[in-house]
Amino acid sequence: MNKKLFFYLFIALVFVACKHNTVKISGTVVDPVTGSYLILDELNSNELKPIDSVKISAAGTFSFKRELKQPCFYLLKSNNNNFLTMLVKPGEKISMKVHSDSLNYPISLNGSTGTESMAEYNRTLRITIKKLTGLNKIYQQNIDKPELPKVIESLDSLANIYLDEINTYTKKYIDENITSLVSLVALYQQVAPSVYVLNPSKDMKYFVKVDSSMSSLYPDYEPVKTLHEQVKEMSSKLTGPTKPAGESSSGTIAPEISLPTPAGDTIKLSSTRGSVVLLDFWASWCAPCRKENPNLVNVYNTFHKKGFQIYQVSLDKTKEAWEKGIQDDHLEKWIHVSDVKYWNSIVVPLYKVESIPCNFLLDKEGRIIASNLRGEQLQTKLAELFK
């Protein structure tokens, strides 16, 4: 190839790549303060890193440009008490209209699904905070009255209702956004200083769920690594050293599963009795699951004729993603079932699945004889069973 032609092609490719990764954040402040600035910070695990600042124009407009290689969190702020948390992805063109004193509640915002989702959550959280603040005002109004004890009892009851509502809403929000980094932010929301919406002692399942999903999708992102360490520490404090799911169930009959295949036929787990069965929970979006699939293909080809079967349950959300994962990883030979409900799948509480990949090895009578065997461990165990 002509060297000059190669040079121009190289420059063109670099330009296209940069253009694709360029993020633009622009907007209008409807009530700007003359001479004021907006600051853009990058949110890391333990610090805010200032990366840019712009002066708001007399007309209230502002604009930032950044180059991104992966999604990350930014804080757009005027000061440390007035900020908008943003989840920004490469290539996004974000526009907004905001009030200068309440950036966290934009009048309008578009161009960033993650930031829009967090803004919507903040609006709901704000309603709860207003309700709780209203209860405090009622308390202050009755503080010197003889009926105060009854008032307090009533206010406590209402406060618990409001807190339960936002707790339920937050869990639903996490379930619906389990593959997005916004689910990580939702874990740490507060209705007052040090009063968190989710309590690890009661809601540990959701911390584990988000950790599993984010660690699969963004294993090298610093906030995700920090969450992973926090979850390990919290789990240890709450329950002692964690055991693999199902370890305490060894020797018991595996609970029945009856779910449809991609073709729509319902196949029960109990229909596999008579074979040694690997009951495997996975999803096409789970990177460790996809990494383990070639090993499953290998053990299936080695032991199937000796009486080995795989019953694989997907936690995918869409049938299309599920079927594509099966096809791409060449998993067509064994049984596949799913209700395509992500972490809301009926099998999650049934088998206490807190992270994937997760599996159970069943004997010919359907009893659990081992759990979470992968790689050489699974190969060795099956070789023992079929020797």
Image: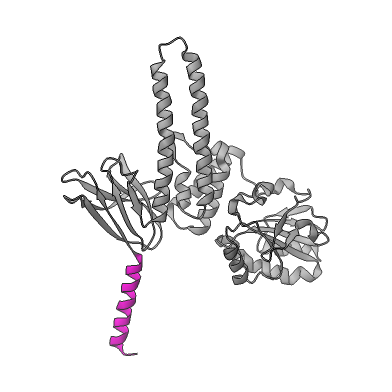
Residue 124: image x %, image y %? 43, 40
The residue shown at (79%, 50%) is 253
Is residue 43 left or right of 229 when viewed as pictured? left
Magenta-colored segment: predominant secondary structure:
helix
Q: How many marks?
A: 0
The quarter in which the N terminus is drawn is bottom left
Q: Where is residue 285, by image quadrant?
A: bottom right
Magenta span of residues: 1-21
The quarter in which the C terminus is drawn is bottom right
The residue shown at (56%, 42%) is 204
Q: Where is residue 14, by image quadrant?
A: bottom left
Residue 9: image x %, image y %? 32, 81
Q: Nearer the viewer, residue 190 or 137?
A: 137
The residue shown at (42%, 46%) is 120
Residue 257 sits above or below residue 4 on the image: above
Asked whether 16 falls inside the magenta stretch, the response is yes
Residue 301: image x %, image y %? 72, 72
